[in-house]
Amino acid sequence: KYVHAFDEIYQFAADMGGAGFVFTGENDAEIMQNSVMINLNVLEQQRLLNREFDRNYTKIFYSGSACMYPEHNQLDPKNPDCREDSAYPAAPDSEYGWEKLFSERLYLAYNRNHDIPVRIARYHNIFGPEGTWDGGREKAPAAICRKVAALPCVGGAVEIWGDGEQTRSFLYIDECIEATRRLMDSDFLGPVNIGSEEMVTINDLLKITAKVAGTAVSKRHKLDAPLGVRGRNSNNDLVREKLGWDYEQTLEEGIRKTYAWIKEQVDSKKVAAVEENFIEFPDGSVEFVDEVCPV
């Protein structure tokens, strides 16, 4: 029976989250097992299909992560080294990073031994609307946007993990998609960084979000929170050389779009909370039992 193979597979699935999920150590076994099994199954099942139907043209994209870079290269928040060739000697700061590094090697091994076409990117903090924004697995841009959007009418402060001077870069989702498509359309296997080089501190990220929101924001620091590496920033030399791609949007432009969407989600929850706080009595009277900031 003739079976048409897929032209392309995009493997984005992983057991992942923000610092509160990845860096506590409480989820390490789950993170490694689930993500490794996803990648093993994708590759092995494709190998078996190729053998059964004597076809081998399905190209597989693997979304790796900058978390696989060595911790010792990211101790200086002002000068992290995340060039692609800095990956070895390997020393990621989390089991999530070790799994990402292993899976890179897994895809390259299936390419060498079974001729499966692969493309590998190392994503640097991709963000945007429709992403996870609450529940404990959200990344820093979504968490900051949610915290600012949820501030009470009067008073309140945004909690920042650590001293806020740790550095990161963040890439808006639309630009990530463009770079990913270029990689898939190219002859370059990777691994290659896909990220922004606009490095900011987390304190700066809060300032940008407050500016977008048009509100004055105070902050309080949680110094015992899990943080990850001290500094991380994409190095785009290789992606510019191989794909002719570079990011175009500023972080503020991306946060503006993301904040608007997250504020809609937060406001929807506020409306639900207000409705729940009205009690209708048998005589038809209604009492508001708690103060909720109006939307």
Image (cartoon, rainbow, N blue to C red):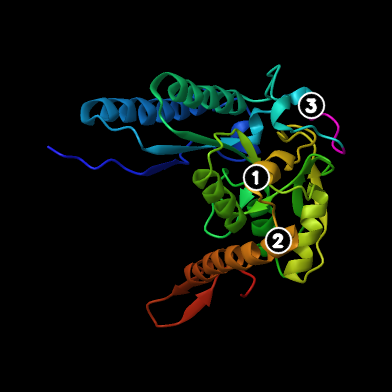
Q: For the C terminus, which image quadrant?
A: bottom right
Q: Which residue is mark 3?
A: 73
**Mark 1 or mark 3, earlier in chain:** 3
Hey, what amino acid is under mark 3? Answer: Asn
Mark 3 neighbour class, 10 Å CA radius: few under 14, some 14 to 19, many 20 or more? many
Hey, what amino acid is under mark 1? Answer: Asn
**Mark 2 or mark 1, earlier in chain:** 1
Report whether 42 appears left or right of 216: left
The residue positioned farthest toward the front in the image shown: 187
Hey, what amino acid is under mark 2? Answer: Gln
Q: For the N terminus, which image quadrant?
A: top left
Disc 1 from disc 3: Cα separation: 18 Å
Q: Secondary structure at mark 2?
A: loop
On residue 249, the disc is 2
Q: Which residue is mark 1?
A: 125
Which x, y percent locates residue 143?
65, 51
Q: Quadrant of residue 78?
A: top right
Above or below for 141 versus 226: below
Above or below for 153 versus 165: below
Disc 2 from disc 1: Cα separation: 14 Å
Disc 2 from disc 3: Cα separation: 27 Å
Q: Residue at x 59, y 50 (%)?
A: 179
Region rendered in magenta: 73-78
Which x, y percent locates residue 160?
76, 47
Chief SS of the magenta region: loop
